[in-house]
Amino acid sequence: MSRIAGRRAAGTGRAVIPSSDLALLPFALIAVGVAFQLLTPAHLNGSPFFTAAPLVAAPFFGKWKTAAIGGAAVAVAAALQTAEWALWGRFDVRSMERQLSTVAFAAVLAVLLSIVVRRGREQLTSAREVAEAVQRAVLRSPAEYVGGLRVAARYEAAQRDALIGGDLYCARTTPHGVRLVMGDVRGKGMAAVETVAVVLGAFREASEHERTLAGLAQRLEEALARDLADREDADSAEAFVTCVLVEIPAGHWAVRVVNCGHPAPLLLDGHGGVTILTPSEYRLPLGMYGLAPAPYRPDTWEFPQGVTLLLYTDGLSEARDASGVFYDPATRLTGRPFPTPGRLLSMLADDVQHYSGGVASDDMALLAAQRPCSEPGAGDGRAWASPSQPDL
């Protein structure tokens, strides 16, 4: 989730000039100032370039190096005035005083700017460390294997250098099998992060104790409703979370899904075949249960060996190309086999960035779980039946 200077800036498609090159700019300005003063008429001098040199140095150097560059600019300006007097007899005391005082003032100001910039960077570093700690605590990366399934997850923030937002995912081994959740919180900022923490906390607790997937969905709804009722902000009345809950029972080659207003997951058969897990009934997002109260009913599909389940947020499916056409993950993945979940997610992240020209309008979370083949070549590549609700 980080970006390196010198590569294309995320979301802009523009090349970024490496900071090491920019750090040479103060010295280039002094050199240009020397040439300008020596090659132009007497009434012109290089003070604008000497003045700019320490100011440009402030963001890239500490206070002492910035002061040294400022001192060098003053010294060069004074040396040029002396050289002009010695070689051509051009000497204007008032002009020299104005030039040197201007450059010296700029040098002092640059040192102060350097101190402010350094403190700002330290505060930013501290804030990023806190954000990374929050991310590790709230949005934990799953283990490579969860309950015998090979698992991978990825989070791509829409804003450059952002670490966490309103998307959520989790994969856990429970007494009822492997349970997964993928969700997207309405809204942005710290309020969305708080909601993510509430939903994931409830999922981690309830997934251990709720016997059915429907019961788990109800527990998440109740936890979110309690949290929203405790908040005093006006936006809480309109908060909701789209999510998909998944259960893969131990000993059964099946996957159960409860979909609460979320993009439908995909099953990839390992040979390029893609099945969209369209639910028999979309439920309202979490936080809106009171508008249409009804029991949650999971749908069930076969989940043979070699098959990969892909969960994602609308940051993937609502990415657009230059003509405004949405990205269709089912179409883009058809005919393309992937040996591991990690390879699948890496390809998706690269493909959607290329498709959208690097312009991301929303965060994107991806979670893939694969039932490994017990032997090479396993995984029959069959088509899957329509959803049903057997009690496996």
Image (cartoon, rainbow, N blue to C red):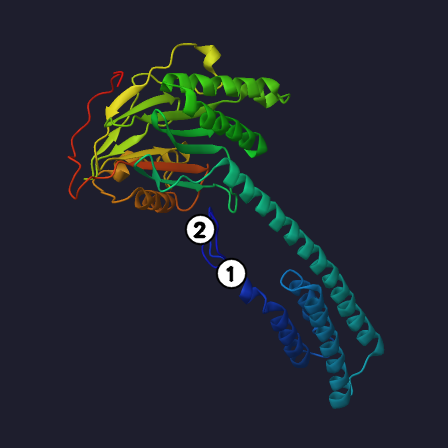
* Residue 267: % across, % down: 26, 32
Label 2: which secondary element: loop
Instruction: Judge whether residue 45 can be spotted in this image.
Output: no
Residue at 45% in and 54% down: 8
Question: Which residue appears farthest toward the bottom when viewing the image?
Answer: 87
* Residue 308: % across, % down: 27, 36
Q: Residues within 10 Å of mark 1 (few under 14, many from 20)?
A: few
Closer to the camera in the image, 330 or 17:
330
Residue at 37% in and 14% down: 296
- Name the quadrant containing residue 348: top left
Instruction: Judge whether residue 161 can be spotted in this image.
Output: yes
* Residue 102: % across, % down: 78, 67
* Residue 379: % across, % down: 17, 36
- Name the quadrant containing residue 387: top left
Quadrant where the C terminus sits is: top left
Q: CA distance from mark 2 to mark 1?
A: 13 Å
Residue 234, numbered label = none
Residue at 44% in and 16% down: 218
From what the image shows, is residue 46 above or below residue 233?
below
Asked whether, in this view, residue 209 is left or right of residue 82, the answer is left
Residue at 44% in and 51% down: 13
Q: Are marks 2 and 1 in contact (CB under 8 Å)?
A: no
Asked whether, in this view, residue 69 is left or right of residue 281, the answer is right
Residue type of the residue flagged with mark 1: Ile
Residue 17, numbered label = 1
Asked whether, in this view, residue 341 is left or right of residue 16, the answer is left
From what the image shows, is residue 117 above or below residue 31?
above
Residue 13, numbered label = 2
Label 1: which secondary element: loop
Residue type of the residue flagged with mark 2: Gly
Q: Residues within 10 Å of mark 2 (few under 14, many from 20)?
A: few
Closer to the camera in the image, 84 or 166:
166
